[in-house]
Image (cartoon, grey):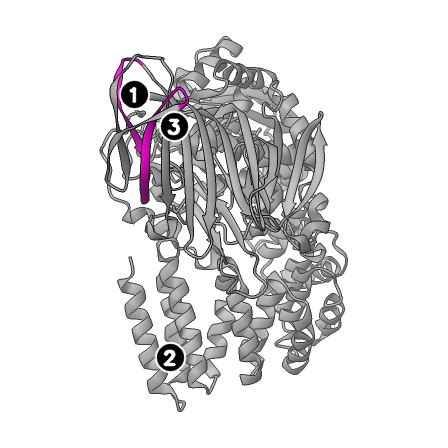
Amino acid sequence: MRKSLLLALWLGWAATAAAQQPTATTYRATERKVNDLVHTKLDLRFDYARRYAYGKEWLTLKPHATAIDSLRLDAKGMDIKAVALLQGAGQQPLKFDYDQRQLLVHLGRMIPANQPYTVYIEYTAKPDELGARGSAAIRGAKGLYFINPDSAVSGKPVQIWTQGESEASSVWFPTIDRPNQKTTSEISLTVPAKYVTLSNGQLTAQAPAGPGLRTDTWKMDQPHAPYLFMLAVGDFKIYQDSWRGKEVNYYLEPRYAAQAKTIFGDTPRMLEFFSERLGVAFPWNKYSQIACRDYVSGAMENTTAALFGEQAQGSARELLDWEYSGVEREIAHELFHHWFGDYVTCESWSTLTMNESFANFSEVLWAEYAHGPDAGAAQADRSLRIYFRNPANYAKPLARFQYADKEDMFDAVTYQKGGSILNMLRAELGEDVFFRGLQRYLTQNAFGTGEPHQLRLALEEASGRDLNWFFNQWYYGAGHPIVTIDYQWDAARQRQAVVVRQTQAVRPFVLPLKVDIYTNGRAQRYAATLRHAVDTLYFPAAAKPDLVNVDAEKVLVWQKEDHKSLAEYAYQYRHAPRYLDRREALAAAQAQLTEPLARQLLVAGLSDKSPMLRQLAVESTDLKNAALRKAAAPLLALLAATDSAVPVQAAALMALGTLQEKRYATLFTKAMESKSYRVQAAALQGLLPLNPAQALARATAFEADNKGALTTAMVNVYGQAGGPAQWPLVLAKYDAADPSGRFNMLPGIGEFLGHLDDATALNQGIARIKDLTVEFKAFIDSERIIGLLRQVQARQAAGAHAAHAAGLVEQAVAEIRAAK
């Protein structure tokens, strides 16, 4: 599962939602196995009008350890029509108890341990009547989703799809909905003949099923967990690819089909790279990827059939604006799950790290391989910063046996911290040993489950080293080191001292690391280990080093206050080899802009070989500083006009736009001819304060073709320079956008509502802002949006609709604050 996050502008949930979580002290044991799933056969038909699924199920199980006379299944919100035990060609009706959550089947006799038996169940699944709660990572728990089933929304496709994680598969079929269960499957789907279907495994049969209907049968002969079951139904075009003779398919809406190869075409390369690197070939019989509408998360690793939200499809122009941290990263993430999560599944939600931390780590692996070391390091850094963003994360162990709700496990500890820990462990053990250990873990637990101790043992076997110390502090302990680093050169003793103080509240961490000592442009590397609250490390140094680079490999999970001088950071930028060496130097420069050397560093960053660092340098350049503005502006203009990376070009245009200087009007006008929506958006924003009338005219010209950032920029232009004639279009764009797009538009809509002399528009706009805030209140900083509403109220205070606006805002604020 790849969680999707809303627009960072409004994200207060990272700091606030965690504080609302109840303290959990209940020990969450791995689910006891009374019965083992063996095979699940489903026959499903769909009622689009009622949003029901009519199901028949043949469920084969066997008692795990002792004889049993009953079977307990998860079955959420269903109508159970019949339950029977198969006996030869006949059926014996069985008594059952059902409380809308679990189905207790009385088998009528004792069934010995390990003896297979099959139960038949006829049922109706009613997901829309369930009222299930989602989480920060997965916004819904209905299991089965009907998208626009009555075609009420013009132009929106009719689809059905499922989302099983964590325990929502039992909304659409009775099962033992736990990650430590595995079953083979056969799923028959009777659907309108005009639609395409997708499910786990291979399509083995298609047959007419009455007027306008067809039945597709999908078989999975390898066992997988119930939460990984999936189906999708709709109008999709299939792009057929292959890898080592296996089917590799991409399912997109017809209008995006031309981009299928561009979006997903690296999948065979990923399959080859991950197979080779892990020493375990992709273990499943096919791999399909599908993009669906209104998906409740980012993407999901359903076995052999990964499902992505609509962010994974776009026009050729939209794809120009995509970055690695978006869809390509998600593709790698979900594919890697087919080893870590699908092939070997976490034993319980307490050990979700065995799934999600590895998938997070794969994002770094693929970036390194496909785009180079800087790209890999940038992704690792981006991921770790997400963990550090929320102090509530620091109290949570990675393997977490106490939690309030299983959904709480889908957080930045399990994902980002866990992936960073694996990256650190890779550096500690070395590439070859680390991946031999992963190969051992996968082969020893194939088609089964795993937990951190099994990973530890496999890595110990591969390395010949005890790793209890590492797993105890990083997997079973919480927090991370918080350090200060000081330097002292002793001329008399010709040695360099490095003093590292660990200041975190928890015990000191054991931290093996590398230290590079630079003298005359050359580095000497030393290995060291920190163990105490204060460690002093000594290194030979006949002359004062030009630079001491602690954690030279830049992999430690720690927060540091590094007391280097600005001159040492400048040396680090020029001589140290890694992406994070240069990033640290640019960050140090940003904090000391009164120093000429700091300004020189930032200007140098504008020409960095890494587009991520060029963008950082652009965004760190304070153009209010006259000296920096004079040095940087010509380079910014060059980047805005010619940089090969869209994010850098757009960032440079945005920076120049803050100057509000007429001399850049021509640059903005020319940039609006770009094919990139993002570049056009930045140029339009830059033009707005210089020539509002021209910006309004250009925005109007873009109405025929705009997406993403350009749509947001148009809304901003209309918000400041538009009038009643543009309001219907703004409203339509807002209603058509996904949640992130809607949050992006809020500043422009707030501006618009502040000056519109239209009571109906105020009703429409304030209601939408309120509804969006209520829907996502658990994940955002709702007080910031309340502040936006108050600004609308204040700006309307002198107008004819002051009382009306005030009433609408007060009611909206009350509903937002009352929402749970």
> What residue sits 39% from the left and 66% below the top?
771
Instruction: Name the residue beneath numbered marker 3.
Output: 351
How many callouts does the rendering have? 3
Specify the amino acid type for callout 3. Answer: Thr
Distance, label 2 to label 1, CA atoms, is: 61 Å
Question: Can residue 585 be seen here?
Answer: no
Give the percent coordinates (x, y) of residue 29. Answer: 28, 25
Residue 171 or residue 638, whichever sits in front: 171
Mark nearer the viewer, 1 or 3: 1
Mark nearer the viewer, 2 or 1: 1
| Residue 82 colored in magenta in the image | yes
**Helix, strand or loop status at disc 2:** helix
Instruction: Name the residue beneath numbered marker 2.
Output: 793
Instruction: Name the residue beneath numbered marker 1.
Output: 34
Disc number for residue 666: none
- Is 112 drawn above or below residue 173 in the view shown? above
Q: Which residues are magenta?
A: 65-89
Mark nearer the viewer, 3 or 2: 3
Q: Residues within 10 Å of mark 2 (few under 14, many from 20)?
A: many
- Is 361 drawn above or below residue 149 in the view shown? above
> What residue sits 44% from the left and 13% below the top?
457
Residue 620 or residue 309, whichever sits in front: 309
| Residue 240 colored in magenta in the image | no
Left or right: residue 86 versus residue 673 is: left
Give the percent coordinates (x, y) of residue 190. Answer: 52, 43
> Main SS type for the magenta part?
strand
